[in-house]
Amino acid sequence: MRIWGSLVLGFGLCATASAATVSLRADVWFPMNGEPGSARPGFMVEIATAALKAGGHTVDYATMPWERTLMSVRQGQFDCAIGAYKEDAPDFVFPEEPQGMDQSFLWVKTDDAWKFNGLDSLKGRSVGLIGGYAYDEAFQKFVENAGNGVQVQTINADNGLEQNIKKLQAGRVNVVVESESVMKAKLADMGMSDQIRSAGTLTDPVPMYIACSPAKASSKEYARLLGEGVRQLRASGELKAILDKYGLKDWR
């Protein structure tokens, strides 16, 4: 892909005998990461491919459910998890520079007049979540308190968001928590942009990372390359070119 040419020159090509295939895993969370091998595999996958290629490495990217991703990367079966918060896996090795920024929104059907007005407004609602995701700590404690009358349905699947949207549409839940960019992309893909709306923000923007296994000595080097890669991409204008493909802007 021509987009990486200037980045490799900027870093200085440094392929050595230690060049490796770096395994990246996550559940599908487009536009952060999407269908492996597609023209738009996700902006975080493209960032990783550029940064790691500059170190002489290639990328092996595939999808799996998020909880299994964290467990497998933690055990060293794979190298890094795409789209992790530090709260997801505080024991992982994180780059100094984030590979994106995320903000959680609450989503309802367009004919539902409910608006989020603090945690107490969730009382009596049924909320769809995805297993293994790091949600806001205060929110998590609130919805897990049975006395607050919030019903929580958690799904563990590679297509967890799509299933939660279908449950929302069918009335099996009446609130779904998800990133704005991720939800908008999925609704557009499903042809449902006019059927689901935002009911408010749950969190302030939170840094996202490609976080690497605490069980592998190579993780420090991969994290270093990922952090430096973002800075180089931004300075060269390549980050903007990547984000433009997904209709996004630099988070800094």
Image (cartoon, rainbow, N blue to C red):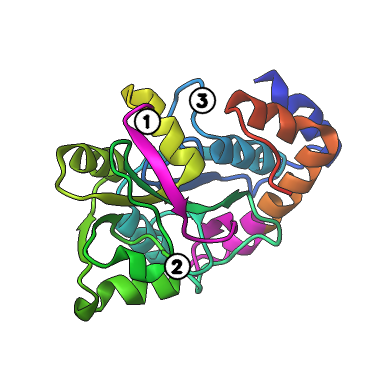
- Of residue 193 and residue 134, the one placed in the foreground of this image is 193
Select label 2 or label 3 by which is in front.
Answer: 2
113 with respect to 99 (left or right): left
| Quadrant where the N terminus is found in the figure | top right
Foreground pick, 62 / 164: 164
- Distance from label 2 to label 3 (Cα)? 29 Å
Amino acid at dot 1: Leu
Q: If you read the primary sequence from the N terminus, does the residue marked by circle 1 or circle 3 appear first?
A: 3
**Disc with the residue nearer the chain's start (1 vs 2):** 2
Callout 1 secondary element: helix
Residue 229 image offset from top left, x and y in percent = 73, 45
Please say if the residues under marks 1 and 3 sit with CB atoms less than 8 Å apart.
no
Report if the CB atoms under discs 1 and 2 are less than 8 Å apart.
no
Residue for badge 1: 187
| First to last magenta residue range | 194-223
Tell me if residue 211 is in the magenta stretch.
Answer: yes
Circle 1 Cα neighbour tier, 10 Å, few/some/many (<14 / 14–19 / ≥20)? some
